[in-house]
Amino acid sequence: MVEVSEESIASIRETLSHFVSGVTGGRKIDSDALTLTRVEKLRAAVVSELESSSLGVHLDLINSKNQFSFACYVAADFTWSHPFEYQVIVAQLTIFFFHAEDILQDKPEVLRQLQLNIATGQPTGDPVLDWYARELTPKLWKHFDPLVANMIVIACYDFVNGIGIELLTKHAEVHREAPNFPDWLRFKTGLSPMYALLALARASDPQLPTGGFEKFVQTIPDVIIFTNIVNDVISFYKEHLAGEKGNYIDMRAHKDGVDVVAALRTLADEGICVRDRVLAALADEPEYRDNFDAYAKGITHFHTSSPRYRMVEMFGTPAQA
């Protein structure tokens, strides 16, 4: 663990408070912000579906690090304005991502060959990936407009590519003549292209003649950026303590010639501007605007409440259940 000065901690705390208020419409990092969302009902529904799938005999494999609960926190917070069955799908997609990251550590070749094996109808070499490709993916077309479903699947595969690239480049400095590399890689590894679609789409969209996508598609690039910024800003403290290098803020600081705490503040301000821009762009589409507003609050709450990001160390204790 890296020793961080009190001055830096105070600056980080101030930036986080400023950021959370700016992206949630004035909320504070108080006991409610630090308290996990209740997910018992959602978790039971997710596990019940998995038990009746081909993964029924592999549940211990995919819950070795409490992935079920963590995925449900993501789904419940990110899509809290959506129907319950919609949240079940989001949780299952999130379980796939967690498992894919674990596979990278132990069986990277399985991920490298994933799309080839799916395209040729061969087993993927992993039961969770088989379930994802043969059972979970086809469900998406029941819940989403075909174009949106296509994009969600592509985002999943691009994430697999992204984490492979990240592993190859984690010790490399950004070349001064390749300034767009950090943003390009962040686009692939943040899961944001998928969650941006899941957050704004409505459960009723597939019943519309055009799927509704044209009503919010122009905001998707900014929602992707916003998603990445929320994660980067709120995860900064725990990564800074751990002395992690090669993350987005570290690369931005190197590119801009500033220290990481200054880069954090700049990114926080950018995130607030992006949030305001999306809300303005959706002013004439109130249902999609409300979905984004709910998403901005929900993704922020997920990050402030998760013990993973160590917000309690700076802002106090969660509310008592």
Image: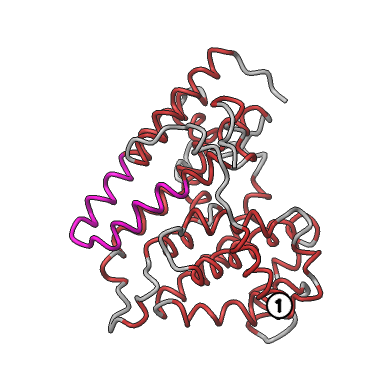
Image quadrant containing the C terminus: top right
Q: Is residue 128 above or below residue 283?
A: below
Residue under the point 58% across and 64% down: 91
Seen in the image, is 306 located left or right of residue 145? right
Which stretch is magenta? 273-299
Any magenta on residue 295? Answer: yes
Horizontal and vertical percent position of residue 86: 49, 70
The image quadrant where one finds the N terminus is top right
On screen, residue 318 versus residue 294, left or right, reads right
* Between 163 and 102, the one nearer to me in the picture: 102
Residue at the spot 43% in from the left edge and 28% down from the top edge: 17
Q: Which residue is mark 1?
A: 130
- Give 321 or 184, whichever is nearer the viewer: 321
Q: Is residue 37 above or below residue 49?
A: above
User: Among all residues in the image, which is located at the extreme left?
Assistant: 284
Residue 36 lies, with reference to residue 11, above or below; the image says below
Please tell me which residue is depicted at 47% across the width and 81% down the height of the picture. 141
Quarter of the rendering containing residue 289:
bottom left
Give the x, y percent position of residue 272: 34, 38
